[in-house]
Image (cartoon, rainbow, N blue to C red):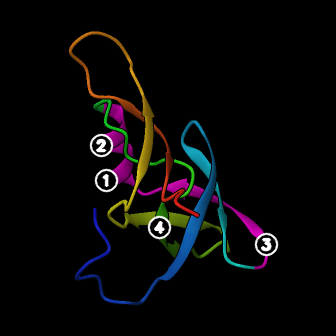
Amino acid sequence: MPLAGRSGKHSQMILAQMFGPSALVWDGASLLPASLDPKLKKEAGRGASVLAVGDEVEVAKNGDGTVSIVAVAPRRTRLGRSTGENREPQVIAANAER
């Protein structure tokens, strides 16, 4: 789900690490634990490279103080690797041009 056209009620952060359905996001000052929004979990379950380290993500605060990743901005650049014959490359890093 791209960031364009979103309401702006959420914070934008950088994805720092992924481990299964959980992640760490960087808010510019600290790393925060985050989970994937159910829509993003569904996309990831279909084998898509939904998130990669370096992605710019939009997060929403949950009632318990945790954050959920609700949207991903289009990638400016990507570093990928082959996952086998006739398959899309797996994106392992995004926006790493600096």
Rendered location of residue 82, percent (x, y): 39, 21
Placement of the N terminus among the 4 image quadrants: bottom left
Secondary structure type for disc 4: strand
Q: Which residues are magenta?
A: 29-45
Q: Element type at marker 2?
A: helix
Q: Please name the amino acid that badge 2 sits on.
A: Glu
CA gap between label 2 and label 3 equals: 27 Å
Observer-side mark, 1 or 4, equals: 4
Up-down: is 48 above or below 17? above
Q: Based on the picture, tell me whether residue 44 belongs to the magenta stretch.
A: yes
Residue position marked by numbered label 4 in the rendering: 57
Q: Are marks 1 and 2 in contact (CB under 8 Å)?
A: yes
User: Which residue is pictured at 78% across the width and 79% down the height?
Assistant: 29
* Badge nearest the viewer, 4 or 2: 4
Residue that numbered label 2 is attached to: 43
Mark toward the start of the polypeptide (1 vs 3): 3
Q: Quadrant of residue 96?
A: bottom right
Q: Report crowding for label 3: few under 14, some 14 to 19, many 20 or more residues within 10 A (C-alpha).
A: few
Q: Going 52% across and 64% down the picture, which residue do you hit? A: 68
- Amino acid at dot 3: Ser
Q: Quadrant of the C terminus?
A: bottom right
Q: Specify whether residue 93 is in view.
A: yes
Cα–Cα span, label 4 and label 2: 15 Å
The image quadrant that residue 90 belongs to is top left
Which residue does the image show at 65% across and 68% down from the upper left? Answer: 66
Name the residue beneath numbered marker 3.
Answer: 30
Going by the picture, which residue comes out furthest to the front? Answer: 98
Q: Which mark is residue 86?
A: none
